[in-house]
Image (cartoon, rainbow, N blue to C red):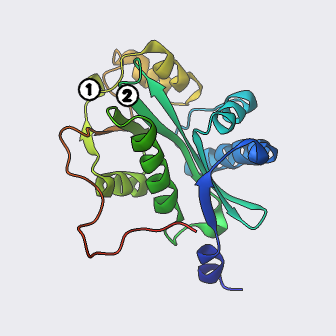
């Protein structure tokens, strides 16, 4: 079966306790991607990823029973900010829009659960920046993101953390991107145009 057809058969959904069996695979996939790219990715432990699934704050992509991709959301600063983090797509499923489907689903989940919150993320990836821009995010200085220490502590496992420290948390290799629901136009297409649908 061609990859294009396989990707069309992938389901993208909010994860729950039935997906806990994928936690180790998710973490191994993220770790491998970080090594290949040579860029920083904050590591998460199995208990943290499992908790996101149990809370209904994670998105998982599956081809049948095979893991294909993942992302999770986390609220910060008394729910004034929500981060979409940990985006990963398995190598063989890349290049066919799956990351965009996962990010859009995470975006919609964030907007549903935290309609007043500003959504943000940190990334070094051009593809993710492009997806974020299409969703209405804009690049911003770190000063416009959450100032909650617990969020930034998550960067400690990144290989570039020393840069963040040296700059007083003002900049790093990542680009900060922000979606402000009070400032941005809706990301949904105009009436009559096709919307992105999930299987």
Spot occupied by residue 93 in the image (x, y as percentages of width and height): 62, 68
Say whether marks 1 and 2 touch (CB < 8 Å).
no
Spot occupied by residue 2 in the image (x, y as percentages of width and height): 66, 85
23 in relation to 67, above or below: above
Does residue 19 appear left or right of residue 110 in this picture? right
92 in relation to 87, above or below: below
- Residue farthest along the bottom direction in this orientation: 1
Q: Nearer the viewer, residue 75 or 86?
A: 75
Residue in the picture at 46% in, 21% down? 152
Packing grade of label 1 (10 A; few <14, some 14-19, many >=20) is: few
Disc 1 to disc 2, how far (Cα)? 10 Å
Residue 142 in sight: yes
Residue in the picture at 59% in, 76% down? 8
88 in relation to 176, above or below: below
Spot occupied by residue 136 in the image (x, y as percentages of width and height): 27, 50
Q: Which residue in the structure is indicated by mark 1?
A: 144
> Secondary structure under badge 1?
helix
Q: Which residue in the structure is indicated by mark 2?
A: 81
Residue 123 in sight: no
The C terminus sits in image quarter = bottom right
Q: Nearer the viewer, residue 45 or 199?
A: 199
| Location of residue 191 by image quarter | bottom left
> Secondary structure under badge 2?
strand
179 in relation to 62, above or below: above
The N terminus sits in image quarter = bottom right
Residue in the picture at 40% in, 38% down? 121
**Residue 64 shows which numbered tag?**
none
Packing grade of label 2 (10 A; few <14, some 14-19, many >=20) is: many
Spot occupied by residue 72 in the image (x, y as percentages of width and height): 56, 41
Q: How many marks?
A: 2
């Amino acid at each position: 079966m061609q990859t294009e057809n396989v990707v069309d058969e992938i389901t993208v959904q909010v994860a729950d306790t039935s997906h806990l069996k994928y936690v180790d695979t998710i973490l191994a996939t993220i770790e491998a991607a970080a090594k290949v790219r040579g860029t920083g990715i904050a590591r998460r432990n199995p208990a943290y990823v499992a908790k996101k699934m149990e809370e209904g704050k994670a998105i998982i992509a599956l081809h049948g029973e095979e893991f294909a991709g993942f992302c999770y959301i986390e609220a910060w600063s008394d729910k004034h900010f929500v981060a979409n983090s940990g985006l990963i797509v398995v190598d063989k499923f890349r290049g066919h829009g799956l990351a965009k489907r996962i990010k859009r689903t995470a975006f919609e989940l964030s907007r549903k659960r935290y309609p007043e919150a500003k959504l943000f993320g940190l990334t070094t990836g051009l593809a993710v920046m492009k997806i974020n821009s299409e969703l209405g995010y804009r690049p911003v200085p770190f000063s416009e993101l959450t100032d909650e220490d617990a969020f930034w502590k998550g960067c400690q496992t990144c290989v570039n953390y020393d840069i963040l420290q040296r700059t007083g948390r003002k900049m790093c290799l990542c680009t900060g991107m922000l979606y402000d629901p009070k400032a941005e136009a809706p990301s949904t297409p105009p009436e009559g145009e096709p919307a992105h649908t999930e299987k």
